[in-house]
Image: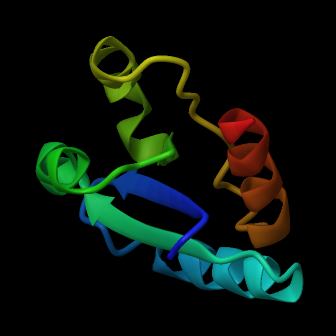
Amino acid sequence: MTDKTIMLVCSAGMSTSLLVTKMEKAAEARGLDADIFAVSAAEADQNLSSKNVDVLLLGPQVRFMKSQFEKKLADKNMQDYGMMNGENVLNQALALIK
């Protein structure tokens, strides 16, 4: 069973794949069992309805959608992707879960 489910949303679902890989490595190094995945903005609603997502993070290219997702999800937050720092983004996601 996965402890945390973290969904990253970007325009096409591919630009965040490197960040997902880095976040997975950071989670593994901590012994954290996490389901971390990226989807396109078009696939986000489907994944929200089919998965129990603990945290949704928006990529910079879809930040304009923040208010739409805030209406759908309580207490979710968009964080920095620019530096592709998997460790930091994982920390932010875990802080949002707590």
Up/down of 7 relative to 69, above or below? below
Residue in the picture at 75% in, 75% down: 32
Up/down of 6 relative to 21, above or below? above
Up/down of 90 relative to 96, above or below? below
Residue situated furthest right in the rendering: 30
Number of marks present in the image shown: 0
Residue 38 in the image, given as x and y percentages of width and height? 38, 67
Residue situated furthest front in the rendering: 1
Residue 71 in the image, given as x and y percentages of width and height? 31, 12
Residue in the picture at 32% in, 26% down: 65
Residue 98 in the image, given as x and y percentages of width and height? 75, 35
Residue 15 in the image, given as x and y percentages of width and height? 42, 71
The answer to whether residue 71 is left or right of residue 77 is: left
The answer to whether residue 34 is left or right of residue 65 is: right
Q: Please identify the quarter of the rendering in which residue 64 is found.
A: top left
Residue in the picture at 67% in, 39% down: 97
Up/down of 37 relative to 97, above or below? below
Q: How is the image coloured?
A: rainbow
Residue in the picture at 61% in, 73% down: 19
Task: Name the residue nearer the viewer: 9 or 33.
Answer: 33
The answer to whether residue 14 is left or right of residue 46 is: right
Task: Name the residue nearer the viewer: 31 or 66.
Answer: 31
Q: Please identify the quarter of the rendering in which residue 63 is found.
A: top left
Q: Please identify the quarter of the rendering in which residue 90 is found.
A: bottom right
